[in-house]
Image (cartoon, rainbow, N blue to C red):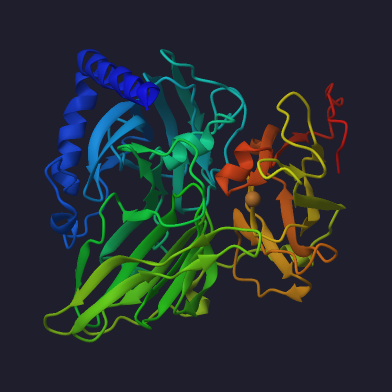
Amino acid sequence: MQSLLMWRATLLGALALVALTTSETIAQTVADDSATGETTAASPAAATGQPFRNPAEIVSKGGLLSTTLTVGPAELAVAGEDVVFPALYNGQYTPPLLRTKPGDRVELLLNNFAQLPTNMHYHGFNVTPRGSGDNIFLSVDSGDSFRYDFPIPKSHRQGLYWYHPHRDPFLNTQIAGGMAGGIVIGDILAPFPSLKNIPERVMLLKDLKTADGMPVADPDPSGSTKRTINGLFKPRLEMRPGQLEFWRIGNQSSNIFYKLSLGGQKFYVIGTDGNLQNRATVTETLILPPGSRREVLIYGPPAGTYLFQDAAFSTGPAGDQYPGQLMMTVVSAGTPVKRIPIPAASAFPKLPDLRKGPIAKQRTIVFADTVLSDLFYINGKPYSPECVDTVVKLGEVERWNIQNTAQEAHVFHIHQLDFQVTHVNGVAQPFNGYNDVVTLPAAASEAKPSVVTILIPFTDPVILGKFVYHCHIIQHEDQGMMSVIQVIDPSKPRPDIRMCQTNP
Ligand SMILES: [Cu+2]
């Protein structure tokens, strides 16, 4: 306890230091408090029922998204609890939503005033993994700064993305500790003129577990957590009956799944993981594994009060069990609005179905728990940044059969790319679009792994270089469940690559 108190004293000293060195940060913190209702005087009762708000935004101008994010300690009230955070962006539990466009340039200065090293990952971006791009191999150490500077291709897909640290092995500490923010690229509704002026709600989901007034540094992913939307605990959203709204929901939690429903109301899913689908798909329950996003259309229900509920969730017999929680109360009231029809499939831009093209190579990738509860492997080995596990040729589409031998779900995510899910445990999946995250269900038994089959197009030259694929249950990633992939140009001499000893 004494060392924890001393650490807290050190943090509060660092808070004062940040106040001296980055007045901009503190100004933004105050602004954030007023914007989100995260006031230090808030009680759990007072926090309940505050109005829903979208996150504050930074918008690109003249083809440039230019901003500074400063990582440092902060003391804030979240979910009615006063919390000392070792590291947040700009002192905010909900840092700015970055709004940018295909063809823009990103210039983002990352300052690290926190104790641990960090860096930045642009989750879902199809951009360069090299140099000052979406390069997760670099480290921004305590006291250092780094300027990210890269173009977003003109052809980039449009939708909801997000940013978070990717400095192994501190991802869980930092993401579970609140370091994550949203990014919107372009205008996903542009193909649908009838939807031009409907209300847009950005809903960034995080969960927080604390001990002694601080985020738990290495949370046990199981059990109860306080789940928030844009940092708001159980806010209240007002809708008009019949009014069509556009909800953009992102799971920014480090480890937990969300299983969301609104009293039997229908969600019309039009976007998955920042990819516009080729049609709207209808569901009453949205399941979001960690890292994933769903962009949905929803009508204001008949007048009344509805609960936006996160159901209890189990990741399997050897996995994590989460109780449910109310996320938000929806109050539908006022004069009913004439319903705007959901766009027909014919209004959606066509997407290439990768099943119809040639497949250059097939691989088996195995996600496995080990006998040690804190070690997780891909293809029989833990993560090593010093070697390359998988080499692929630019221009090729590959089929990956991803096995999960564990009695708990894992979550496959690959950087720089989107993929098409074709089969889950041998069952063919309808083609609605692409993902950058997919759940690997728990194995039926130790002898019978689950298998998810995906097609990955390694076709865009922007991805040349080294990046990673990993489990997006971030505690598993920190404990080894990540591999290095390198995309090479087959028209050039093969670069000197140090292969890992076990590789697919
Ligand atoms: Cu996992």
- Height in image: 383 above or below 260? above
Q: Residue at x 66, y 75 (%)?
A: 430
Residue 249 in the image: x percent, y percent? 40, 60
The image quadrant where one finds the C terminus is top right
Taking the image as shown, residue 477 lies to the left or right of residue 1, namely right
Q: Is residue 328 visible?
A: yes
Residue 267 % position (x, y) = 41, 76
Nearest to the observer: residue 457 or residue 29? 29
Which residue is found at the position 44% from the left and 16% from the top? 142
Question: Residue visible at 67% across and 35% down?
Answer: 467
Q: Position of residue 407 (x, y in %)?
A: 71, 61
Q: Nearer the viewer, residue 102 or 75?
A: 75
> Is the N terminus in the top left, top right, bottom left or bottom right quadrant?
top left
Residue 338 on image: x %, y %: 23, 85
Looking at the image, which residue is at 63% across and 60% down? 439
Front position in the image: 414 or 367: 367
